[in-house]
Image (spheres, helix red, strand yellow):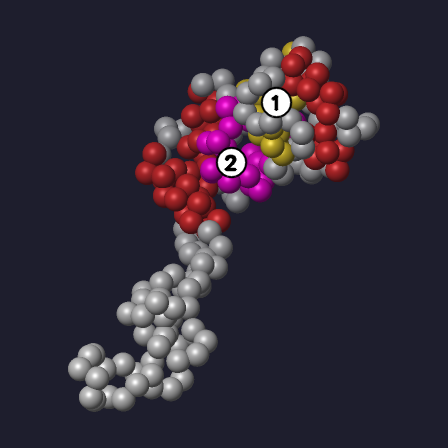
Amino acid sequence: MKLTIYKSDGNKSSSSIVVDKGIFGIEPNESAVHQAVIAELTNYRQGTSSSKNRARVRGGGRKPFNQKGRGGARAGTIRSPLWVGGGTVFGPEPRSYSHKLPKKLKRLARKSVLSDKASKKGIMVVEDFKLESPKTKDMVKMLSDLNIKGRKVLILPEEVSENLLLATNNIPGVFVVKADYASTYDFIESDTLLFTESGLKILNKSLGEKA
């Protein structure tokens, strides 16, 4: 399977790149994609929500009044959950939301999204470009030349340079992730996947059958 390589000025290059059809040309597995996205979003959760139960609320160490003789309900502490200022019942506690998936399933999910993007012309490959300065206007011009300005674009180079990060920081909807680090959710959230030639090669290698 071949993909056209574009120059940074938007013109087609004379060369193309061969990619693995087992990565960019398979029948998408929606179930695998769903499981991968749910797992990734779950793993983003910090699990730091907390509340104070009756043992953690300060005060209430002594019995507020006698057990008998008042005609009312007995009480052992003013920090009972039934009282104002008391502890919380069944409140959130710090916990881990980590959810692991089999490696084969994670690879299948990414392959499925990449194949879907490829079938819908949502993948572009540019020659390896190096920004001489971190100017946003240079990056905006390049996106405009490639006819993808105003779209959600995920730039996937082999290595993320500081100039590339600074040049894209102020452009809404444009993100940069190292090609072999991108997740299924990263792929889905973008309209166009903009690979550098070397970035596509490293992803093609990492998702190949020998990986």
Q: From the viewer's perspective, is residue 44 above or below residue 195?
A: below
Between marks 1 and 2 in the image, the one whose residue lies nearer the viewer = 2
Q: Quadrant of residue 9?
A: top right
Q: Position of residue 183 (x, y in %)?
A: 51, 40
Q: Position of residue 171 (x, y in %)?
A: 64, 26
Q: Nearer the viewer, residue 209 or 151?
A: 151
Q: Which label number is shown at residue 21?
A: none
Q: Position of residue 68 (x, y in %)?
A: 21, 89
Question: Which residue: 24% across, 88% down?
Answer: 67
Residue 40 lies within the magenta run: no
Question: Which residue: 48% across, 59% down?
Answer: 48
The rendered magenta stretch, by its main secondary structure, is classed as helix
Would residue 84 be found to the left or right of residue 67 on screen? right
Type of amino acid under label 1: Val
Q: Which label number is shown at residue 186?
A: 2
Q: From the viewer's perspective, is residue 85 above or below residue 123?
A: below
Mark 1 and mark 2 lie on one chain; the one further toward the N terminus is 1
Q: Quadrant of residue 37?
A: top left
Question: Which residue: 81% across, 28% down?
Answer: 133
Question: What kind of element bears circle 1?
Answer: strand
Query: In the image, which residues are magenta?
Result: 179-208
Type of amino acid under label 2: Asp
Q: Position of residue 172 (x, y in %)?
A: 60, 27
Question: Which residue: 51% across, 28% down?
Answer: 190
Q: Which residue is mark 1?
A: 125
